[in-house]
Amino acid sequence: MGEQAKKIGEKLEGYGEKLFSGFGWTELTRDKEIKCTRKGTHKKRTHGIDLLMSFWNPYLGGKQGIIVECKNRKMAGITQEKMNTWLNELINTIECTQSTEEMEDINLEDTNLCTGMLLVHANDKFDGEKFNSYLHHMNVPNRRNPINIFVAGNNEINRWNSLRDKILKDYSENFQFVYPSIEESNKELGEFITVNQLFSKYVFAQNIRMQKHKKNGQEYFLPITQKLIISFDEITKESFEYMWSMYKAFQFQDAEEMVFVFYPRTQDDVQYVQENFLKVLKQIKQPIKSEDEEKISIDFIDNRALSPIDTEGR
């Protein structure tokens, strides 16, 4: 039983590395054991690091390190008590990783290491309502030095996997994430998705696709700039209006093509978007202009929780 659990855990660690590497993150180490530097507080001799990854965070102006703790269990084995225990273990591991000499062989120069992610996967039938209840009632311990912890379950894992596959399948090597201006920071582009973007309802991106032209019997290609807003929000008329307001706020209308990407949660969502998205934008206080409408296209990310459906865009 222990050996089988170890194999399942290793499989999830490999999956996590593949998933996050697909978003531009770098694996620094995995399956590393370190000595506990706070035995009196943590009541442990060692800590285990499943995955240590890093990515460039434009809002920090440097590299952000993140320790990913991977748990793969049957849903019955994911309990409130277990979630609280895993959270505490992850925070303790981060604290010791910050100070242990055993990390000296890993290049952590200029890396901010105060973030962790608890990746919890149910390998049978996932109960999202119960999982969210656990999140709501988790006991988060206070620390003198703040540590940021993100928790992801099956829904987040599936969503990220579908996003990564969508980018690889339908967009070019010139695809970049957009980091909007926040508190006087400059808007930037990059190949890395930040951990905050992973948990956001909306992700901004830019893609350069090459469009074929023909003149005097000669074929040639010209770059077309696409500005994308990817929505993981519930699909409603209000969310359509909000997406358009953000699109204007970030001055994306200068793009040659404006792409709105949706993640359907039900069988009816795709049809609802196709029938109502433009209709809603034409009925708001400041309706879209005809020249903007001509530049708009609609796209969808495959939701693996649904049966195969027609997600053909506009």
Image (cartoon, rainbow, N blue to C red):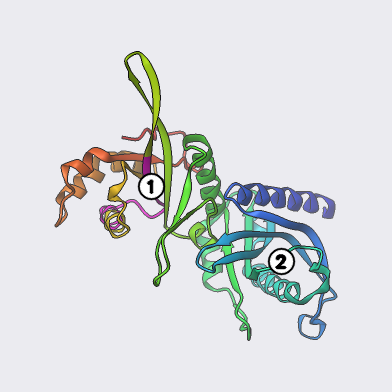
- The Cα–Cα distance between marks 1 and 2, rounded to whole angstroms, is 33 Å
For the point 69% across and 58% down, the residue is 71
83 lies left or right of 162: right
Q: Secondary structure at mark 2?
A: loop
For the point 37% across and 41% down, the residue is 225
95 lies left or right of 58: right
- Counting from the top left corner in percent of width and height, residue 160 is at 53, 50
Seen from the viewer's position, the closer of residues 213 and 9 is: 213
Q: Residues within 10 Å of mark 1 (few under 14, many from 20)?
A: many
- Counting from the top left corner in percent of width and height, residue 103 is at 79, 68
Residue 63 visible in this rendered orientation of the protein: yes
Seen from the viewer's position, the closer of residues 33 and 78 is: 33
240 lies left or right of 107: left
Q: What residue sits right under mark 2 in the picture?
A: 108
Please state which amino acid type lies under the numbered disc 1.
Leu
For the point 52% across and 39% down, the residue is 173
Residue stretch rendered in magenta on the structure:
225-243
**Rendered image quadrant of residue 81:** bottom right
Residue 19 sits inside the magenta stretch: no
The answer to whether residue 212 is above or below residue 21 is above
1 and 2 marks in contact (CB < 8 Å): no
**Rendered image quadrant of residue 139:** bottom right
Q: Residues within 10 Å of mark 2 (few under 14, many from 20)?
A: some
Residue 73 visible in this rendered orientation of the protein: no
Say which mark, if any, is on residue 202.
Answer: none
Closer to the chain start, of discs 1 and 2, is 2
Q: What residue sits right under mark 1 in the picture?
A: 228
- Counting from the top left corner in percent of width and height, residue 179 is at 45, 59
